[in-house]
Structures are given as structure tokens and as C-alpha cells.
Image (cartoon, coloured by chain):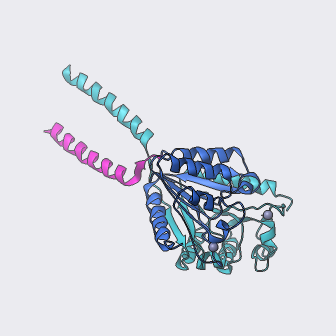
Chain colours: A cyan, B blue
Amino acid sequence: MKDDADKAVLQGLKKYVNLVQDDLLQPKPRYLDAFFFPNEANITKLINYLGKAQKSMSICIFSLTNDKLANAVYDAHARGVKVRVISDDECMNQIGSDVKWLAGQGVPCRVDSNSQFHMHNKFVIIDDTFLITGSFNWTVQAGKSNQENLLVVDNPYYIEKYSTEFENLWKQFASN
Amino acid sequence: MKDDADKAVLQGLKKYVNLVQDDLLQPKPRYLDAFFFPNEANITKLINYLGKAQKSMSICIFSLTNDKLANAVYDAHARGVKVRVISDDECMNQIGSDVKWLAGQGVPCRVDSNSQFHMHNKFVIIDDTFLITGSFNWTVQAGKSNQENLLVVDNPYYIEKYSTEFENLWKQFASN
Ligand SMILES: [Zn+2]
Ligand SMILES: [Zn+2]
């Protein structure tokens, strides 16, 4: 009898431990990184992250003039990854912009259409699995000379929020 | 005898469950947020986050011209929070910059000293507890008109990385 009572108490406790655990814990991240510029090695780091894409790559980038990064985007497109690029209209028309080149290679690209304001985001969502975001534009100067940051994260909360924003902007800029 | 053997097996299993748990799980975040611009309500959201500061506020911001945000920084300083601001030298000297105003109010401020390159980060670490980072400059236009993002995160991994970067830049710009 006493044993049965103990068992019941233990089972009750076990239930609560599980509840607390569900409430307080979550899976550890697989993508956990943060890196800073100026640092040319961190361009390679970013290229390696782009190289991981197997299914999709959704890019919002204000300025894209770094040919190494543009090539990494093209490579993903060429190996069958669903690549989409949203950029800023004025930046796209500046000398050295790689957005028109990517569009010419068949990569779907869209831009905002307001000359006064900016599509100023700089983020990329890869395989709906991890997000890279921060201050870093994909330019040579930003990597070589500016103080910049990028953060890599895979918590599904952020992936969902940024993916939704990407899809909203993609629709909003449909005619551009 | 059989019971004792069962107990040993169970205890062994329990040990492995604990190990796997430590390896795969971590505490759930208390600060988990992401928001986008243009959206004036999200300026208020950012101000509310700044209002949470009780001990420290380490800010790296390329451009700071939004008076509401400058006031939120000043308020933190006035209530005894250890506020420090790192900004960009050219931005600081532009009309409407609030960095000089904050410095005049006694808030420790430093800038880079390279007219060609930019201290282009836009992040703030609050109470060594959570980080807000993204593309968003603290300007009126960025909130009202640009496409921008901010992410709020409290994983200690990021806090440590961004704090280290902040301290490095603070030292690097000591003479400015
Ligand atoms: Zn624009
Ligand atoms: Zn500068």
C-alpha cells in the first residue's frame, strides 16, 4: 500500500518535471555564430555559409557589389537552389552592382521602387533552417574596412518571422 | 535479485537521459523578438526595450538622429544606467545628429576616425542580458520609410561575442 502511494507520488512528480522541462528548455542551436568586420577571412566564412544551401536562399541585401559573394549566390542558383534576391533600386543601378548581373544569369531579383527610401535589410535565410543578419552589406569595403557585424541563428521563431517578411517584400516588389 | 538488476538498468538509463538532455537542450530564451520597418509602432517597441535597462547599455550605431531614441538613451543615463555610445565620425558631424547632444549631456561617446570608412554597426547590448541587432539606424527615415529589421536575442553566446566586440571598439576609438 505504501509502495503504491510512493509510486503515485513519483509519477506525479515525473509529470511536473516533464512539464517544467518543456516550458524551460528547448533544443540547442545547430547554427550559432557571430562574426565581425573588417576581417577578410569572415568573407570566406559567409561564402561557406552560402555554400551550405541545398534547397533555398532568400536574400535581402541593400548593396551587393562583392563579386566573390555574387559568385557564391550564382553557384547556389547553378546547382539548383531556389535563390531569390531583393535589393535596393538605387544600389542596383550603381556601377559595380552585381544584382543586374545575377538577374541576367536567371536569378529572380526584385527591388523596391522608391528613390527616396531604401530597402536597407541585409539578411539571408538558407534552407528555411538558418538566418544570417546584421549590418554587413555585401560590398568589398564593408568586409575590408568597415566595422560591421553578422549573426547566425536557427531558432525557428526568427526563421518564421524573417521568412514572412521576405515573402511580404517579394510580393510588394512584384512589379519591379 | 531481478528487481535490483532492473534498478541498475534504470539508473544507467537515467544517467544517459540526463547526458543527452544536457547536450541537446538549453534554457528557453526570455528575450525572443524580431520586428520590421517601416513601422512607427516599432520605434516605440525599441524605446520600450531601451527602457528596460537597469545597469548598462552599450550602443554601436552608425547614425543617430531620431530624437525619441536619443531621449530614451539620455533617460537611461539620467537614471544611473552605465550608457556608452560608439558611432560614426561623419554621421556624428551631420546636421541633426544626436551623438554630440548626448556627449554634451555627459554620456560617454566615441567615434571611429576614418573619413573613408564607417563604423556601420547598429546594435545595443542591455544589462549584459540581451542584444538588439539588425539593419536599423536610429533615424526618423529608417523607422518611417525604409525596409529594415531588428532581432532581439539573449543567448549568452551572442552577448559574449558582441560585448567583446564592443569593448574592442571602445578601446580602439579611445582617443576619439
Ligand atoms: Zn531605394
Ligand atoms: Zn566613418
Q: Quadrant of the N terminus of chain A?
A: top left
**Image height check: is A51 above or below B107?**
below
| B15 falls in the magenta region | yes
Q: In this view, does A38 lie above or below B67?
A: below
- The image shows a total of numbered marks equal to 0
Q: Which residue is drawn at 44% across and 65% down?
A: B164
The residue closer to the viewer here, A5 or B21, is B21
Is residue A54 inside the magenta stretch? no
Residue farthest top in this picture: A1
Q: Nearer the viewer, residue A105 or B13?
A: A105
| Above or below: residue A50 compared with residue A19 | below
For image coordinates 71% across by 77% down, the residue present is: A65
At which x and y percent is residue A5?
Answer: 24, 22
Residues A170 and B35: in front is B35
Magenta part, dominant SS: helix
Image location of residue A72, percent across then percent down: 65, 75
Q: What stretch is highlighted in magenta?
A: B1-29
* Quadrant of the displayed image that contains ligand 1: bottom right
Quarter of the rendering containing residue A63: bottom right
Q: Quadrant of residue B104?
A: bottom right
Residue A21 location, x and y as percent?
40, 40
Can residue A129 be seen in this snapshot?
Answer: no
Toward the left, the furthest residue is B1
Tell me the quarter of the image containing the C terminus of chain A: bottom right
At 84% from the left edge and 60% from the top edge, which residue is drawn?
Answer: A114
Of residue B16 and residue B97, the one placed in the foreground of this image is B97
Q: Is residue B27 left or right of residue A106?
A: left
